[in-house]
Amino acid sequence: MEKTRETPQHIAIIMDGNGRWAKQRGLPRLAGHRAGADSVREVMKACLELNVKYLTLYAFSSENWNRPEKEVTALMSLLEQFLANKLDDLVRLKVRLRAIGQVDRLPNSTREKIAEIEQATQHHQAMTLVLALSYGGREDIINAAKQLAEDALRGEILPSAFDAELFASKLHTAGMPDPDLLIRTSGEMRVSNFLLWQISYTEMVIVKKFWPEFREGDLFAAVDEYRKRHRRFGSL
Ligand code: FPP
């Protein structure tokens, strides 16, 4: 297939600006997160239309635990509601759910809901919706390093045999292709401890809109931008 026509196989998104969107409208921050959940639905639909195979959303970072307890609790319950409401859609659309991050830090009720849906959708192949929850890129790397060190201590592998492929197989994203495209909303030019290892060669598109304003058309525009870049930097 011609490089210029490629659809990204894996899109990762830093969904930023829920709080500012709400503030602009004189609403509580939670209203911003709620509106953000509608954008998640839009983007899932757009990715399915484009035949994107992996959509990874930065839904809750390791650092987000430092927010006021009230906001953390509200985000968790929003996530549970989203999952409960989405189950039918995920089944109908053959979307698989996968959570990455320190999922064991999440409240029991959230963990149980995730585990239930991961199991119910495990054979789905239309697309994998990856939710990064209590996720931090540095933690991901440290966790992989620990596992490799333990394997080495047990004598199962020599440190000299460590390579990028083996390292990647110990990350939370094991078995997934690296993102082709990373989108961040609300205009910030930061990676904010998202998929540090995995975005080594990823194209980034920064969108000015706040996340709750992000719609299907914005996703298509970001993918167009990605395709243009490939045209410019195509392999010669
Ligand atoms: C960033 O906005 C967003 C988050 C920390 C959470 C993302 C959560 C959602 C979109 C809602 C539900 C998620 C799913 C998967 C249904 P911010 O609060 O950092 O905004 P600000 O920078 O303007 O304060």
Image: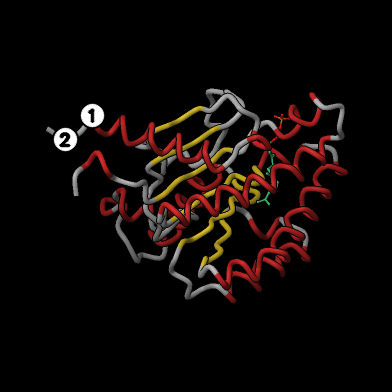
Q: Position of residue 188 (x, y in %)?
A: 58, 23
Q: Tag 2: Cα neighbours inside 10 Å, few (<14), some, or many (≥20)?
A: few
Name the residue at 35% across, 66% down. Answer: 156
Q: Is residue 105 above or below residue 189?
A: below
Is the residue marked by circle 1 packed among few (<14), some (14-19), or many (20+) residues within 10 Å?
Answer: few
Disc 2 residue type (three-letter): Ser
Residue underneath mark 2:
235
Q: In x, y percent, where is residue 16?
A: 64, 33
Residue at numbered disc 1: 233
In the rendered image, the vertical position of residue 97 relative to residue 214, given as above or below: below
Tell me which corner region of the image, top left, top right, bottom left or bottom right, holds residue 23.
top right
- When the figure is inspected, residue 124 is found, relative to residue 185, above or below; the finding is below
Q: Nearer the viewer, residue 46 or 106?
A: 46
Give the percent coordinates (x, y) of residue 100. 56, 55
Q: Nearer the viewer, residue 133 or 49?
A: 49
Residue at the image position 75 percent from the left and 60 percent from the top: 80
Q: Are marks 1 and 2 in contact (CB under 8 Å)?
A: no
Element under label 1? Answer: loop
Image quarter for residue 71?
top right
**123 to 143, vertically: above or below:** below
State the CA–CA distance, disc 1 to disc 2. 6 Å
- The dot on residue 91 is none
Q: Amino acid at mark 1?
A: Phe
Q: Is residue 126 left or right of residue 60?
A: left
User: Where on the image, by quarter, is ligand 1?
Assistant: top right
Residues 192 and 8: in front is: 8
Residue at 62% from the left image edge and 54% from the top image edge = 102
Residue at the image point whose x is 62% and y is 52% from the top? 41
Residue 200: x, y in percent?
37, 36
